[in-house]
Image (cartoon, helix red, strand yellow):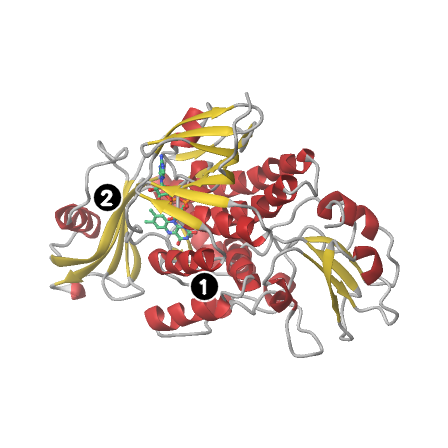
Amino acid sequence: MFVKKDVDVIVVGAGPVGLALASELALAGVSVRVLERRHAPDPAARAQSVNVPTAEALDRRGLLPALERVQRETLGVSGFRFTGHFAGMSLDPGLVDWADPELAAHTAVEGARMIPQPRLEAVLTAHAERLGVTVLRGVEVTSLEDTGAGVLVGTDSGPVHAGWLVGCDGGHSTVRRLAGIPFPGTDPEITGYQAVVDIADPEKLADGWSWSPHGAYRYGPQPGRVVTVEFDGGPADRSAPVTLADVQSSLRRVSGTDVTLTALRAAPTRWTDNTRQASAYRSGRVFLAGDAAHVHPPFGGQGLNLGVGDAVNLGWKLAAVVSGRSPEALLDTYDAERRPVGAWVLDWTRAQTGVLRGDPKSGALRGVLADLLATRDGTTYAVKQIAGVTQRLPLPGSHPWIGRHVPDVPLGNGTRLADHAHEGGFLLLDRTPGAVFGPPAEGRARVVRDDGAGVLGALVRPDGVVAWATDTPDARGLEEALSRWAGRVA
Ligand SMILES: Cc1cc2nc3c(=O)[nH]c(=O)nc-3n(C[C@H](O)[C@H](O)[C@H](O)COP(=O)(O)OP(=O)(O)OC[C@H]3O[C@@H](n4cnc5c(N)ncnc54)[C@H](O)[C@@H]3O)c2cc1C
């Protein structure tokens, strides 16, 4: 059946992942429409910690100043060294080996590591709108049919026809269900709450993480921000609205105090450790990204980051196929590259659930880990994992940059390599005296000439992953990387 397309790509969900993906598609010249069932953005206090790949992805699109501004306003600090925690054990910045090459290579985004999710979504919405993305609010997707040539999407406001569809519609994804993609994993043991509240007697709470046989809680770092964790088998009704009384009862149980909460200052969240991953990120013309593809507890602040990583990986690939620059086979690399990263994050959070349990064996394990995390190597290992700087895709080539996110590259003219990525597309860094790498890349990558020291050449994909790099003026492997990833000359 042939049906005229209304738009190249429909993105379902205007959460952070849908907004990031739609922006990447629009930047690459693809027509995109975002369908969002909520009438207004979600004000709930959810994500706050932004990892290095996410901050760098936004930096490449010129959003670093906006993020730095938000962090200054909400946290009162601009540059600070974010460490995070493992199972509530805070990672001491004083113990971290900041000279570790993987950490030292990615410091340009230090001022954009703690951004409340509603503020991040506001930055992403403004970015998407500047790029001409249409976000239709109050539209719920209810059905879909993959015709082989396109996707017919049913909504409560009528049908839409698109070439492709991406479900960025969160953990309870309708798209995942309609596409018949299984979502195997482990069931919840925990009910958790996160809220920002006014407290009558805050002196009854200890700063940072505290444990009791009933669970754990965190107070801070901002005044009034509380997180509770209870091993109660998960909530009976996940859709019931969260009240101040719910947060107070939980906090009283896990703190063993009679602390009194007087008001909610931001919409609270209930969460669990339900941990699942889609068995495929693609079914025909339908893709999943973000929480629609994977859910896990928020320990260590990974979910939004994982989802934005999906968005920037899929965005340029789908745009290249839609515009006919690359064969459809390029799309298979989305699942191949992103599902292993997701599986790792799921296990990183499952490990923390194991350590957080209130039983004596988990308590003993927590003691062992606390000793390891009190060492320079232990803390540095955990901080690198949380920051996302150890991620590496198995791409061909032996240069240490290949498969990794490109490090900070200051250029001789005072700019950084990331400053040249605002318009998307591939970047080719060429530092050879005779400019030998540039000509083969013409039309497929933006060539950035530099006379500074360091690697002589690097091909950087639109998602920041290095596809080729060399320390010698030898272009071997460059053409192969260009044709594999950048496709035909635009
Ligand atoms: C307490 C807590 C703390 C967290 N802390 C962190 C952190 O520090 N760092 C981090 O990286 N992550 C964190 N996370 C995880 C993060 O909040 C999520 O991973 C992130 O919101 C996922 O984004 P998303 O766009 O995939 O999905 P969502 O944010 O869930 O957005 C999905 C959107 O799709 C819409 N939608 C759903 N169904 C339909 C439909 N049928 N039709 C149209 N629209 C639809 C929804 O209304 C929603 O707007 C935390 C989560 C919680 C609960």
**Tag 2, which secondary structure?**
loop
Q: Residue at x 65, y 64 (%)?
A: 101
State the image coordinates of residue 104 (x, y, percent, origin top left): 61, 67
Is 306 in front, or is 150? 150
Quadrant of the frame with the N terminus: top right
Q: Quadrant of ligand 1?
A: top left
Q: Is residue 106 visible?
A: yes
Q: Which mark is residue 101?
A: none
Label 2, on which residue? 214
From the top left corner, tell me how far across and down residue 357 is, in percent: 33, 41
Residue 240 in the image: state x and y as whole percent.
19, 37
Lateral position of residue 21 relative to residue 411, left or right: left
Question: Which amino acid, mark 2?
Answer: His
Q: Tell me the CA gap for discs 2 and 1.
A: 31 Å
> x%, y% of residue 86?
43, 52
Count of residue discs? 2
| Observer able to see residue 287 | no
* Residue at x 42% of width, y 44% of height: 34
Q: Secondary structure at mark 1?
A: loop
The mark that comes first in sequence, 2 or 1, is 1
Question: Is 150 located above or below residue 454 in the figure?
Answer: above
Image height check: is 335 above or below 59?
Answer: above
Residue 113 badge: 1
Q: Amino acid at mark 1?
A: Arg
